[in-house]
Amino acid sequence: MLRNKASRATKRGPKASGVTASGASQVVRAARKTTVTVATALCLALELAACGGTTTTGATSSHATLVFDNIAPFTGPNAAFGPGLMAGCWTAVGAINNAGGVLGHKFTCIPTDTRGDPADAVPAVRLMLAKTKNLVGISGPSSDSAIVLSPILDEAHVPAFEDTGQALFDHSTDPYFYRIVPADDTTGFAMAAYAFHKGYRKAAFVFSDDLDAQGNKPSAVAGWERLGGKVVANINLALDQPSYTVEASQIARAHPNVIITEMDPQSASTFLRDYQQIAQLPAIVGSTVTLQAQWLDTVAKAIGKSNLQRVMAGIRQYTTPSGPAWTAYYTALHAVASKIQGGPGQYNNDPYNEAYYDAFNIMALAMVMAKTTDPSKWNADITKVTNPNPGAVIVSTYAQGLHALKQGKSIRYVGASGAVDLDQYHNSSGVFAAYGYNPALAQPVRLLAILTPGEINAARK
Amino acid sequence: MNQLVLIVGSGLITAALLAVAGVGFTLQFSVTNVLNIAYGSVMGAAAFAAYEVNKAGANLWVSGLVAAATGAMLSLAMNRGVFKPFERRRAGVFTLIILSLAISLILDNVVLMVGGPFFFSYKQLGQASVRIAGVGFPPSQVFIVGAAVVLMFAVHAMQKWTKLGKAMRATATNPELAKASGVRTGLVIDLAWLISGALCGLAGLFMGIIVGAFNASTGSSFLVPIIAAVVLGGIGESYGAMLGALTIGLVSEAAASIAGVSALKQLVAFAILIGMLLLRPQGIMSGTAAQRGLVR
Amino acid sequence: MSVATGWEFVAITMLVYLGVNLIACLGLNLQYGTAGVLNFAFIVFQAAGAYVAALFAVGPSSSSGGFQTYVGGWDFPFPLPWLVATITGAVIAVPIGLVGLRRLRSDYQAMVMLVVSLIATTVVVSFPGFLNGSAGIALVPPPLGTLLNPISVQYGWLYVGLTAVCCMVVFVLVSALARSPLGRNWRAMRENEAVAIAVGLDVNRLRMLVFVVGGAIAALSGAVLVDFISAWSPDAWLYPETFAFFTALIVGGLGNSMGALIGAVLVPTLLLEGVTLLPTFANPTVSLGLQWVVIGVVIIAFLWFRPQGIVPERKTVIAPPDNTAAALATGHKAQEAG
């Protein structure tokens, strides 16, 4: 009941345990922040002596392994984010390497642990940038540290497909910044739009009070009201509580016909279970987080599969577990199953993972197109690979793209997470759709409806 | 009326968790004077052990036994392996705290390494409601409150009526005198850690059931709330821990209900605690605090 | 970026963090090492300093797009935010001290302070309008950012210089205090409080004083850190962070500034550099988790084999006056008599 963790960003993947967060691990987290000047001075001297000023980004020798870095928490409250990013990376890298790599180079994936807060993230990333040879691309960082790391990464001239929905990146002017996961505010509008589209008019907004859950909330509420819906309840749930009975009863008394929400699996299972004791659950409209495998499994355990199926809808990017792009993703994912922590199954139909995978394919194809592995040279080709282009051949895997480029054609990569259309701020939100829960399916989400941009914009203005 | 039942019900659930955990914590403190920062981590490790067993097919009763046993063994090992040797070297209070911190670090991360960064959840007791006074409660919650009551009674019985209970009290009050009077203080202390460890492990299981899903760091996140309950009720007193837990549980739920703000739940509990610290820092039941000279 | 630049940035980052930690350790050492006040809510003071420094430099939320909600938000030039931050640390020490500084035994006091630390975190997270909740405050402009390009290496070294100046100031202050009569009173209070009271020292006032001074120093460390990374969030100051500083002091040696310095340097080396040399496994969770386990083991081992720290405190021995022998003899006779 008394929570002592400050935040639990839950957006990407199941909330993870970090060990470090509350317990002693923080002792060292803070310790981590200082470092031996002697050691770094030594390193500096050695590097200068050995390499004489060659760059760390871009390959110097002809068959060096190129490095993709994944920046996320690997320990701390959100320790599951890191393995999630790595899963996307290994999936892509496996397929790219199988197709022969890029210009004779193969790839590998490395982790960089931000430990979930900006103060720890900065030294970790600085160290990574200094010591990593042949760094060519980045997946991440996530919301906990994106805002401080983004300028550092941009200045290092390494393209980063960042894993944050924060609104302040909606108008990013950094040339090396890319975002193909949906922005929080757009997702919020989409949530409101879908609930309204279904005919509900009395909404209760229930969000856990951690960083990522709160991201969608303002636009969800604002969009709902703009559309004409009524807000009958609006609460933030404190984390790590044994019971939400009192909160649930307050909401139930307001008689909502829909609960619009984003919460981590723990809070969700507690809250929904407690709510069900008091009143029948109304419809639920959640977000991408609420459609992830672990969320659905945990909540289904708490409230019953049939109940969850009856009420649940979540808004996320429209991707289908079918079609050539997804099939290739699925194959590649399971081909590297031994490298995927927690097993590949949970990522079968995970749009975040699919987006991470696509990001690496995009970067590899840009390298091929620019005929160089130096990011400062191929960065500009990223949009050429993703954006619509009359006469371009649509490709759904790296191998296909490589083949088409070799033949001199222009391409458009449309991957497992769908078509990417980067605007002038390097943002691409994609198409939103509503999904429900269906335990009978292999991938337990089923498509309910695809949202049109018009519907979403109606909530936005 | 319904509202009242709801408040009391959810307050009891919180109280049950904090009481079981708190009694164990305060027992450790009373007998060995250790502020055990690793307590929450032991809860988490025990909850994880129970999860593994439960996943393999055991029912919740067996899982509960596993949790209790894990907690007991880890706690005993902690005392024998770390605290005792340092205490023999006359390590100060501060060193012991830092040691317990290091243990917490190790434990939490071992669970992370073994179990992975994802969520664990038990196969629950089902979703059928148990109706009490017109309000439905999940069977797991009712079970836990019941179990907590039984455990509290057992602790009470042990302290009041068994030789061990008396020996523990003697050791807590004055270890030198107790030893001189023939109490096998070494054994008593070991048993105290075993028992409090078992309570800790069970609290971990309850926590896992109550919050629906937990991970390697959830246990640690309950440490300070447990401390708060124990300090409120009076450190070193089992009844104090129960009282503190009850107070915090009921008042915070009531506050959340009245004010309509979930966050207020915790803040009201803390405000009570602060008030208590300002006015009566030794807590509601001040026996041990007074006797140990914790507040001068 | 070139290799050299990359390592320069690493050096800059590490030096600034070292400086921040050193300032914090010096403050904590003053409280615990010199005066014996166990402040397990120490991190709250650093956090308060960071937030205030941020608020006084970041300007109103609307000026940066309105993504954040917080009270106030002004745009004062450097070094004003740092000064205000330091004062804030001193100011909040008073109410916190009133709650936690009562004459409690140290481990009980530790528990109380831990709860206070948790309360602070809860308040900030639960009321997002106050300090932007879990997201924290970002987009803090770098001090003196108009002098040099803030993302350049030159600016980095400038910042290292600023940090060094603050370290110097704090070091001089702490050393002066330690040598002063006030410092002697604090040490007397730490050594034997009953005697200190008997001699007429107002221990309550002494405790509050060291709490205030240490709090101010901690707040300064927060200000220096926040302006360097340009953001601050609740995750950066959860209650266990306090232990990191205590560990540094234990390793370095309590009660003296050299120990604080060594601790601030070594703890990260031991813990940061050393553990990254461990073999990495394919599974990063296991590798990174293992690092923490090693750290915990190292802490325990250190406390076992070298509990006094690397630079043990030198106990000042006051030479007895020359007629001691006679006094001792009389004393002995008195003891034997009864």
Image (cartoon, helix red, strand yellow):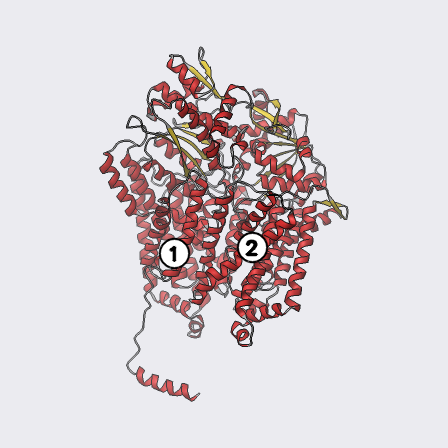
Q: Chain of mark 1?
A: C
**Horizontal side, residue B282 vs residue C289: left or right:** right
Residue closest to the eye, C95 or C335: C335
Look at mark 1 in the image and give the residue it sits on.
C27
Horizontal and vertical percent for residue A445?
60, 28
What type is the residue that disc 1 sits on? Gly
Q: Quadrant of residue C54?
A: top left
Q: Chain of mark 2?
A: B
**Alpha carbon separation for disc pair 2 and 1:** 38 Å
What type is the residue that disc 2 sits on? Gly
Look at mark 2 in the image and give the residue it sits on.
B71
Horizontal and vertical percent for residue C85?
41, 49
Residue at the spot 69% in from the left edge and 34% down from the top edge: A307
Residue farthest to the top? A391
The numbered dot on residue B154 is none
Give SS at disc 1: helix
Give SS at disc 2: helix
Residue closest to the eye, A82 or C263: A82
